[in-house]
Image: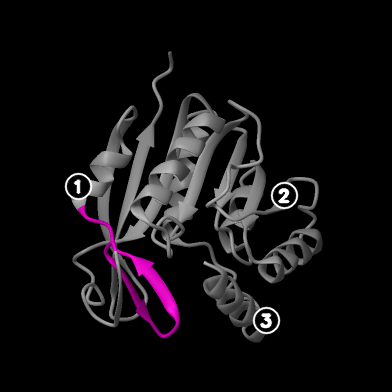
Amino acid sequence: MSDQHEHWQRTYRANPGMYGEQPSDPAVYAARLFRDRGALDVLELGAGHGRDAIHLARQGFRVTASDFSAEALAQLRERAEAEGLGDQVRTLEHDVRQPIPLPYRSVDAVYAHMLLCMNLSTQEIRDLVGEIHRVLKPGGVLVYTVRNTEDAHFGTGTALGDDIYEHGGFAVHFFSPELVDILATGWELRERQSFEEGELPRRLWRVTQELPRH
């Protein structure tokens, strides 16, 4: 993923705030759900420059915003401080192929918009979900979004294997229904909701799954 790391660093450097300031629809959904579940501490994986992390902090959550791009996290911290949210948002430079550097059962909820469908092998994704399981408290909830095999880009561009295709320098792992089910093993799968975002348009799923309370 080193080439992807450099690609994202350059992209964020060249396009500060590239996704805008408004939260994504999945982040608005996640904030409502997390509040309903009584969550306080939220981990966002792949937070980028922070449009969703800022929204979660505005809703009163304590947010740990993780990304492997130091450039993106610098933009996130600057915005959090500017909005008076510095005490509610902490950043964590982290490559999700490595163990999450947080203690066992230390967060109430995890949110990841378009992170699990990055240039990660199926095994790396399974290992990551295992790590999410480890850091979540019993009854904790995970909301993630991924591009799926109904997307127009699936099967086109440069094939990298394992349902990963590269377009314009960005590698994407397209999710099948079977992969969603595999990742829900040991969880309670609450929802797999189809939605569209951006140009093409991109076709995604928003997945909600919870850990048993005992």
Relative to residue 111, is residue 63 drawn left or right? right
x then y, percent, for residue 36: 47, 32
Label 2 vs label 3, nearer the camera: 3
Residue 104, image x, y percentages? 60, 27
Q: Secondary structure at mark 2?
A: strand
In space, the residues marked 2 and 1 are separated at their CA atoms by 35 Å
Q: As shown in the figure, which amino acid type bears the numbered disc 1? A: Glu
Mark 3 or mark 1, earlier in chain: 3
* Residue, disc 1: 178
Range of residues picked out in magenta: 162-176
Foreground: disc 2 or disc 1: 1
Quick check: marks 3 and 1 in contact, CB under 8 Å?
no
Q: Residue at x 26, y 62 (%)?
A: 148
Quarter of the picture containing the C terminus is: top left
Name the residue carrying label 2. 89
- How are the residues colored? one colour
Residue sitting at 26 percent across and 77 percent down?
153
Task: Provide residue 69's location: percent of width, then percent of height.
Answer: 65, 66
Q: Which residue is mark 3?
A: 13
